[in-house]
Image (cartoon, helix red, strand yellow):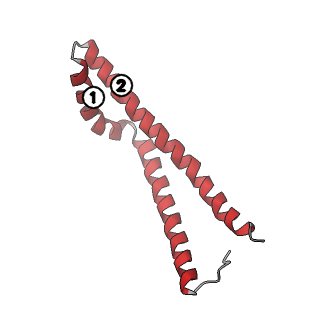
Amino acid sequence: MPGAGPEQPTGETSEVKPNLARDIALYTAARFGLVAIVAVLLMLAQVPVLVAIAVSVVVVMPLSLLVFGKLRRRVAVGMAERTEDRRERREQLRAQLRGDAPADAE
């Protein structure tokens, strides 16, 4: 069954991938949203638009570490898991290429 082997790794990575992609998208949207909120608040205080955007980007960088800490940690954990999964698959491939492991290791 040649189709059975590739389906298992795809299923494993698809389990991690959507959560990681969702977390990255949420974290990015949250940071952009915070930049927009701070910029609007500065513009309401009569700060010019470009200055308000520049200041809000600088202010939001450290602020997002505090405000979105839990989401940032989820992204970091997901990226670490994905990196480890890729490292394991790379080692399996290298072992197969060296002839140390059977080609259909399950």
Q: Quadrant of residue 66?
A: top left
Farthest residue toward the bottom? Answer: 99
Residue 37 position, x and y percent, is: 35, 23
Report whether 45 appears left or right of 104. left
Mark 2 sits on what residue? 36
Report whether 52 appears left or right of 68. left
Q: CA distance from mark 1 to mark 2?
A: 8 Å
Mark 1 sits on what residue? 56
Residue 58 position, x and y percent, is: 24, 34
> Residue at point 40% right, 38% down?
68
The reply to whether discs 1 and 2 touch (Cβ–Cβ < 8 Å) is yes
Report whether 11 appears left or right of 20. right
> Residue at point 49% right, 53% down?
78
Report whether 11 appears left or right of 59. right
Give the quadrant of the C terminus.
Answer: bottom right
> Residue at point 58% right, 47% down?
18
Nearer the observer, 75 or 32: 32
Among numbered discs 1 and 2, the one appearing first in the sequence = 2
